[in-house]
């Protein structure tokens, strides 16, 4: 199975900051990676698919990059509604696995 | 607008079978373009993929749960269902159903908390 790791596990940031989260796979997954945002008590929301494609309705301040084993999610200018936990997920093949999450807080 | 809604008991006794249903509205489950999946999240922890089903009935399960999990689809009711047998306290979690497109989950239900306790 492909294992996913994320760093950092948490990050403290301020409104307007640029935030970068890293995700790494235990083996190459080409661009088969998705990013999700989850707020407390809510279901995750898809942000990015195919490593760099913005899901419909997602603000352009979110961007994804990478391929192979190393990926990044960048929030160019953090907004108050962006404080949440972010998960990566490989979409390469069954069984799918998620990263452990990165909490972005104030 | 596609919507998914989980339903089922919120409390299950240890060693019994957890059963949940996901009702899909605003779109057909009988589509060759999508898969339908279950994901769970223990309180305060991360996300775990449980399994996925195609409208034809083909299933894919997490190997860590494979012997205990069963997912089925009822296209006439636009529903798919999850059964997890021999549950323990470790199966206490929020269970989500979601639509799956080429691996990623683009629409999610709100989630339902299932507690395993006597």
Image (cartoon, coloured by chain):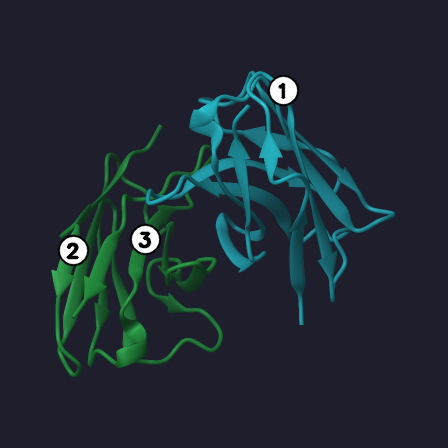
Chain colours: A green, B cyan
Q: Residue at x 73, y 34 (%)?
A: B57
Chain of residue at mark 1:
B
Q: Residue at x 82, y 46 (%)?
A: B75
Q: Are marks 1 and 2 on the same chain?
A: no
Q: Position of residue B7 (x, y in %)?
A: 68, 47
Q: In which quadrant of the rendered image does the N terminus of chain B lie?
A: bottom right
Q: Secondary structure at mark 3?
A: strand
| Cβ atoms under marks 3 and 2 closer than 8 Å | no
Q: Between residue B104 and residue B50, name the one nearer to us.
A: B50
Viewer-nearest of discs 3 and 1: 1
The residue sitting at the front extreme is B118
Q: Residue at x 60, y 40 (%)?
A: B10
Q: Are marks 3 and 2 on the same chain?
A: yes
Q: Dot 2: within a 10 Å radius of its alpha carbon, few (fewer than 14), some, or many (20 or more) residues?
A: some
Q: CA distance from mark 3 to mark 1?
A: 31 Å
Residue that mark 1 sits on: B16
Q: CA distance from mark 1 to mark 2?
A: 37 Å
Q: Secondary structure at mark 1?
A: loop
Q: CA distance from mark 3 to mark 2?
A: 12 Å
Q: Dot 1: within a 10 Å radius of its alpha carbon, few (fewer than 14), some, or many (20 or more) residues?
A: few
Viewer-nearest of discs 1 and 2: 1
Give residue A8's mark: none
Residue that mark 3 sits on: A87
Q: In which quadrant of the rendered image does the C terminus of chain B lie?
A: top right
Q: Are marks 3 and 1 on the same chain?
A: no
Residue B23 is left or right of residue A40, and the answer is: right
| Cβ atoms under marks 3 and 1 closer than 8 Å | no
Q: Secondary structure at mark 2?
A: strand
Q: Position of residue B16 (x, y in %)?
A: 63, 20
Q: Image quarter for residue B85?
A: top right
Q: Dot 3: within a 10 Å radius of its alpha carbon, few (fewer than 14), some, or many (20 or more) residues?
A: many
Residue that mark 2 sits on: A10
């Amino acid at each position: 199975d492909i294992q996913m790791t994320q760093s950092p596990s948490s990050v403290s940031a301020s409104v307007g900051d640029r935030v970068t989260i890293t995700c790494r796979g235990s083996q190459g997954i080409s661009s088969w990676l998705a990013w999700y945002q989850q707020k407390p008590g809510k279901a995750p929301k898809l942000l990015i698919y195919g490593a760099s494609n913005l899901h419909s309705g997602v603000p352009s301040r979110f961007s994804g990059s990478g391929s192979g084993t190393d990926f990044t999610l960048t929030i160019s200018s953090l907004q108050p509604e962006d404080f949440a936990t972010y998960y990566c997920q490989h979409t390469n093949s069954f069984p799918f696995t998620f990263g452990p999450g990165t909490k972005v807080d104030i | 607008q596609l919507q998914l809604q989980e339903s089922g008991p919120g409390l299950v006794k240890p060693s019994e079978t957890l059963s949940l249903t996901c009702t899909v509205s605003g779109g057909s489950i009988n589509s060759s373009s999508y898969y339908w999946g279950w994901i769970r999240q223990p309180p305060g922890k991360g996300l775990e993929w449980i399994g996925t089903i195609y409208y034809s009935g083909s299933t894919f399960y997490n190997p860590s749960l494979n012997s205990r999990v069963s997912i089925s689809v009822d296209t006439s009711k636009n529903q798919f269902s999850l059964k997890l047998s021999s549950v323990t306290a470790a199966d206490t979690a929020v269970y989500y159903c979601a639509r799956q497109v080429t691996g990623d989950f683009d629409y999610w239900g709100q989630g339902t908390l299932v507690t395993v306790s006597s």
